[in-house]
Amino acid sequence: MRARIVMAALETRYLEAGDPAAAEQRARYGLRLGEQLTAGEGSHTLIGQLVGTAVERVVLKPLEPDRVYEFLPDVGAYSPRPALWLVGWPI
């Protein structure tokens, strides 16, 4: 749980410092961690899946909702901003 909070805090600091590339890199790492917990090796338990979804949500939240991020998965034709539904942004 602490790791996701630290990752989100780092993203926010990088964005505030004017370094969106570094913030995006942290979001990639966090998203990869969340994917491992929701669909990879950590997905064998419900708690692992729940934590993975929470990690994804926390690391995506600091990102700008109107920007397209190449590392986010495409969730289909209905979403112009893929995977942003995780943080509650309207799509």
Image: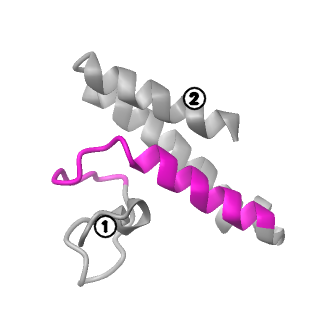
Residue 20 included in the magenta stretch of the image = no
The residue that mark 2 highlights is 6
38 relative to 69 in the view: left or right:
right
Label 2 amino acid? Val
**Residue at the image point whose x is 59% and y is 61% from the top:** 53
The x and y percentages for residue 15 are 29, 26
**Residue at the image point whose x is 70% and y is 42% from the top:** 1
The x and y percentages for residue 2 are 68, 34
Residue 5: quarter of image: top right
- For numbered disc 1, what is the local secondary structure? loop
- Depth check, mark 2 against mark 1: the one in front is 2
**Residue at the image point whose x is 41% and y is 34% from the top:** 25
The residue that mark 1 highlights is 82
**Residue at the image point whose x is 83% and y is 70% from the top:** 44
- For numbered disc 2, what is the local secondary structure? helix
Q: Is residue 89 above or below residue 59?
A: below
Earlier residue among tags 2 and 1: 2
Labelled pair 2, 1 in contact (Cβ < 8 Å): no
Of residue 54 and residue 40, the one placed in the foreground of this image is 54
Of residue 69 and residue 84, the one placed in the foreground of this image is 84
Q: Which residues are magenta?
A: 47-71
Mark 2 residue crowding within 10 angstroms, few (<14) / some (14–19) / many (20+): few
Q: Note whether residue 31 is visible.
A: yes
Q: Residue furthest top?
A: 17
The x and y percentages for residue 70 are 29, 53
78 relative to 85 in the view: left or right:
left
Mark 1 residue crowding within 10 angstroms, few (<14) / some (14–19) / many (20+): some
Residue 54: quarter of image: bottom right
Q: Which mark is residue 48?
A: none
Quarter holding the C terminus?
bottom left
